[in-house]
Image (cartoon, coloured by chain):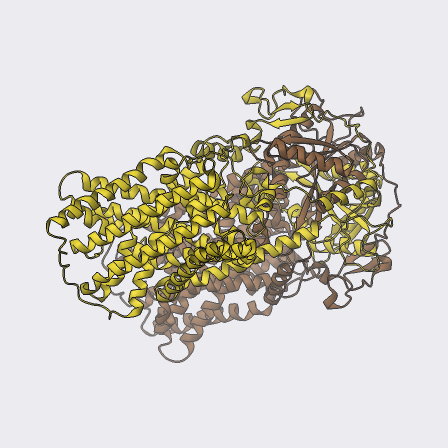
Chain colours: A brown, B yellow
Amino acid sequence: MAGEEGQGGTVVTPSAEFPPLAEEELATLRGIGARWRAGGRRGELPVDPTLGRYRRRPPGRFGRLAPIELFKVEEPDELVATEPANLPGSRWGRAVTRLRRTLFGPPLSSAAVLYERMRKLVALPVLSSDLLSSVAYGPEAMLSVLVLAGSGSLGLSLPLAAVLVVLMVAVGVSYRQTIRAYPHGAGSYVVAGDNLGTGAGLAAAAGLIVDYVLTVSVSVAAGVHAVTSALPGLAWATVPLGVLVIAVLLAGNLRGVRTAGNIFVVPTYAFVLAVVAVLVVGWLRAAGRGFAPVPPPAVPAAEGLGLLLVLRAFASGAVSMTGIEAVSNAVPAFRPPEWRNARTTLGWMVALLVLLFAGLTVLIHLDGLVPRPGETMLSQLGRVTFPTGPWYALLQVATTLILLLAANTAFNGFPRLLFFMARSDHAPRRFLHMGDRLAFSNGMVALAVAATVVFVAFDGRTEALIPLYAVGVFLAFTLSQAGMVVHWRRRRGAGWRRRAAVNAVGATLSGLVLVTAALAKFTQGAWLVVLAVPLLVLLFARVHRHYATLHRALALHPPGAGPAPTAPAEVPGVPAEGEELPQQVRHLVVVPVARLNRASLRALAYAASLGQPTLAVHIAPEEGEADRFRQQWAAWGDQVRLETIVSPYRAVIGPLAHYLEALHASRAELTLTVIVPEVVLRRRWHRPLHSRAEQRLRSALRALPGVVVTSVPVHIAE
Amino acid sequence: MAGEEGQGGTVVTPSAEFPPLAEEELATLRGIGARWRAGGRRGELPVDPTLGRYRRRPPGRFGRLAPIELFKVEEPDELVATEPANLPGSRWGRAVTRLRRTLFGPPLSSAAVLYERMRKLVALPVLSSDLLSSVAYGPEAMLSVLVLAGSGSLGLSLPLAAVLVVLMVAVGVSYRQTIRAYPHGAGSYVVAGDNLGTGAGLAAAAGLIVDYVLTVSVSVAAGVHAVTSALPGLAWATVPLGVLVIAVLLAGNLRGVRTAGNIFVVPTYAFVLAVVAVLVVGWLRAAGRGFAPVPPPAVPAAEGLGLLLVLRAFASGAVSMTGIEAVSNAVPAFRPPEWRNARTTLGWMVALLVLLFAGLTVLIHLDGLVPRPGETMLSQLGRVTFPTGPWYALLQVATTLILLLAANTAFNGFPRLLFFMARSDHAPRRFLHMGDRLAFSNGMVALAVAATVVFVAFDGRTEALIPLYAVGVFLAFTLSQAGMVVHWRRRRGAGWRRRAAVNAVGATLSGLVLVTAALAKFTQGAWLVVLAVPLLVLLFARVHRHYATLHRALALHPPGAGPAPTAPAEVPGVPAEGEELPQQVRHLVVVPVARLNRASLRALAYAASLGQPTLAVHIAPEEGEADRFRQQWAAWGDQVRLETIVSPYRAVIGPLAHYLEALHASRAELTLTVIVPEVVLRRRWHRPLHSRAEQRLRSALRALPGVVVTSVPVHIAE
């Protein structure tokens, strides 16, 4: 726990992009500094870097906007960029920025990071929308499988529901313990990684990533289905409606929908109330007829009632439990004592889940309803229970809203997970970056793209997505609970055996569901997840390996003892890129000159002003042109040593790059500075009129060791 | 004439990309050189730039290939790049180059530019394939219009053909004079531009460009039609066949199909012989029945026989004259005396054209043939004339081949025209560049792309393309002949009145055809050309204006008198980019540092080694991070002045660019050198793992005046 805290723990901060240096790195830094002899005159800057005297800038490029203070001085030695300083310089860039700000709002300062604390009555709806919304499609998912064996087998839903209730309670109790043990946040990635090793953590993360993507896809699909159940005329527009909903969710989250806003409170409680009303009215009515079940309409069996079918039905029903882990991720967001409040909230949530899930399953059985395409079971139940009046419409509205909120929770969880993974170098670093609005915009966009792809690929059909859903979630559950067993064994605190046993039960039951779901629904689509999870783990591992190589390559080493610690000249081709001290850098400045004009003369003047040995190179297509160029050079006074190379095949970039490579090979400790005159055009349509030789030269030289490229721009006014 | 010669005239040379300096520019250069005080130690280079001692390079990046001499020393002071030196360094680039060389052959040395001279018997087929191939579709184009007024009006083809023959002779005589007057090449672009002004030259060029594109499209369409007339089963594949043919023509020309090859001789003479055979046999047969015309099958009239229809038929028939200008473009390719040989060849060509055109038109009338879709008239005539035996097949093969050769001539003319336009700054400079195979590959690709677009847009139907064809050609004819009139008037040599009169007749007749074609076929598609030509002229003018601005901006000016001739500091925002002398450059080196690692320390060491005032800048997202970074900086020993900027909105590029701009605004004569550490990755798939901050920074800084950007690379081995 303490170790976690030290490494930043669950604290989300914009500074995560700038990790601090370790103590040995600081020591190396001191060693390097001690041997450093800078050539520059320390402190004698030709300008005031604090801009102190230039705070009120005269109108320059922003002339139209009148003087704007782009920087303010806060401490004596520190500038703070104000908001206009973020605007890009180009007209096109400014237009894009303005459009973005209109859509998503002005940027928020880092100081606005909120560490809000929730009380339990707010935390309950915020954290339970994902879990409770699952009952809108969970029972139906189970019955849709059972009905394949004919309406006679629908009665099996009761014992299956009983087993699921046991599972819910077991996993709930198991997570209560996890919350106590990880008060700083008990995400499966952290718990499994801490206790079972990086591989398990990555597997849990992969499961969660699949789960988050499917949460969005399934919730949006179910929400759209709730709408089309009430308004069947809209059924054709399922896919565009779903894509629109995901886009709106993305836009809202990029703008920054505050998780703790009241928008969560009303729909969640409304949904709970609406379902409870359905349950009360339905049960009263059933009591009126002595709880005699209405016989369901006869549905012919499409498959035999085998064990596999029952297991599939069970695994499908288990999706009702998705979202149960939400509290454990969010422990630090509770008011103190955090872990106790979180634990209480989790208890309420599980109790509500059991009530709604069991109540609905039994009521559906009593009313003799069967799944049918085109209308959700909750909608059928609503129509039966409230044949008249606005109640049915209210139920559907509440269902739709809570499903959309459930999708929204993934927009909080997914980028946070990627942030933690990126902090441990398992995901691209850009997921560390907080966007304009202090949200992890990159993660949100990634989630929206992935969810849209899945949604469109499955035509927005909830029943087709369900088989993929359980595998990822239960993988994360299992690994997290198994991690807790190891946790207790390692700690061996008071009562650790009992605690380990509780988590072991949770892990075992979750593991059973996981295996059941993966096997029973393998051919229905679960194979996709079974394939995706190891591929994702492999990808994360490769990403980690790359960053590790990079860290090693960029790590600070104490400088060598001699004056030239770089690769010896006898081994050309080896990059001479060790740490260098200023006094060790040996320069050769090379200026490629195509013709003598203002641009190339500026580059030559710049090169000569550096006061280092300088060589100009001209590539000529023919001997005659080379002679002509040498005459011009002589007319100029032969100020810089010129080397002409005849390239009879008229290529310029290739021979120049090979020539520089040959120069470098002849003295590997040299730093070649290639100074390229660059004509900067103002208009985009002028670019095809130029050869982009500078860019091509730069990309050809990038690969060469010890070659520094300098662009000296000349701006064309028009 | 002499002036033309002096500016390179019609000589095509790879050095055209490097125009020589004017005398006043050389004088300016001498003035600049006299005031130049280089800081560098002249001549004391740390390496031998001639590579003299390193000719046998030890195995470096090309280790696998064993030592290769990438450069050879020819003169004491000059290197010549050998062919392997053109290979790009990256693996991907080398693979592409190797594929290209397999397809198009190894590169050719500049020394291989051939100035071949043709004797008349070779020049005739080479230059006449475009012209003579027109009779394969010209008479048909005329008859297809006439037949719209019913088969009764087909007889009008005889008087129309007579008028066209007069026109052919008049234009031919007119061009004979042009050849004499412009022995160095009398392209319409040159003649019209010289005598009537740039606008007229550009209009002629636009007409020719449209003409070249249509020559390819029409010839390929007619050639494919000749094939499908013989083999109707292939009719469905017209469009893919045509695209394939254009691709093969492009590939062949990129590889370098020598214009003077024997491949031109055989098909052209074979075509002439085949058509003459048709004429002889057909006329003998007609003589057998006393030249009594076979009555054509009755075709109902679709339109009334108005003046407009007759004019349309006339304009359509005039496409038989396309290609008549070929000789005048190619005068320098003849053996001396060039103009006399060229004139003789032109005479033969026109005589052959008149013979074939008039003969075919009359024979078609005698045999009572009518145009019908699916089979060309020449094919019908062949079937009637040679009912049995291989003669019909030979005729079709010869027709197809000459049409393809005609398309091929455009691949010579179009890039040459663009070369001349680019040399006078009216077309993008890349058309000056001779590719690997000494061909103007950029122009060839542009032609193939344009012709393919036109061909596909018109479904490869010859009759749909014909209405577009005549306008461009006759515009060029008219302007060129009108230019000749002005030419004679200016010269006022012996007999200038007679000569001017001949050209005036040619210009008037061509102009009449031009107006007729543009008006009569306006709605059939000529409007496209009427629209395209002025748009092209506008485009050329804009291109010229851009290059003119560029030349002015890059022209050499004598350096100012004072020590700081740049924009005064009181006017910030004005680019301080006048010519500078080395002793006038005032440096400030700025190193943006995100974190302290090997990459940033190398950049700092490089910066310090330059011995100029140096400033490091760190952009922090939060105050706390800024403090932490300053501590690291102090641990290193505070070797370089550091300025931290807090960017509370977490943007890095924007505030940094604005900060540099503010620094520059405070002393406009400063040259800011921004030294950016750049991590170079070896694998492409690693790039998404990095933020591309260096590239984004570079493009943000490009727009700033007086900011030089230096990339110090660190190569990651893996």
In-image side of B337 versus B690 (left or right): left
In this view, B600 is above or below A101: above
Viewer can see residue A129:
no
Closest to the observer: B718 or A468? B718
Which quadrant of the figure has residue B21? top right
Viewer can see residue A619:
yes
x 73%, y 36%: residue: A633
Residue B572 image offset from top left, x and y in percent: 80, 59
Closest to the observer: B436 or A683? B436
Residue B681 image offset from top left, x and y in percent: 61, 37
In-image side of B668 versus B391 (left or right): right
Q: Quadrant of the C terminus of chain B?
A: top right
In-image side of B111 versus A608 (left or right): left
Q: Exactly how many numbered labels are in the figure?
A: 0
In-image side of A679 versus B256 (left or right): right
Residue B634 image offset from top left, x and y in percent: 83, 42
Residue B581 image offset from top left, x and y in percent: 81, 44
Residue situated furthest bottom in the rendering? A389
Closest to the observer: B112 or B571? B112
In this view, A232 is above or below A112: below
Residue situated furthest front in the rendering? B494
Closest to the observer: A126 or B456? B456
x 83%, y 34%: residue: A36
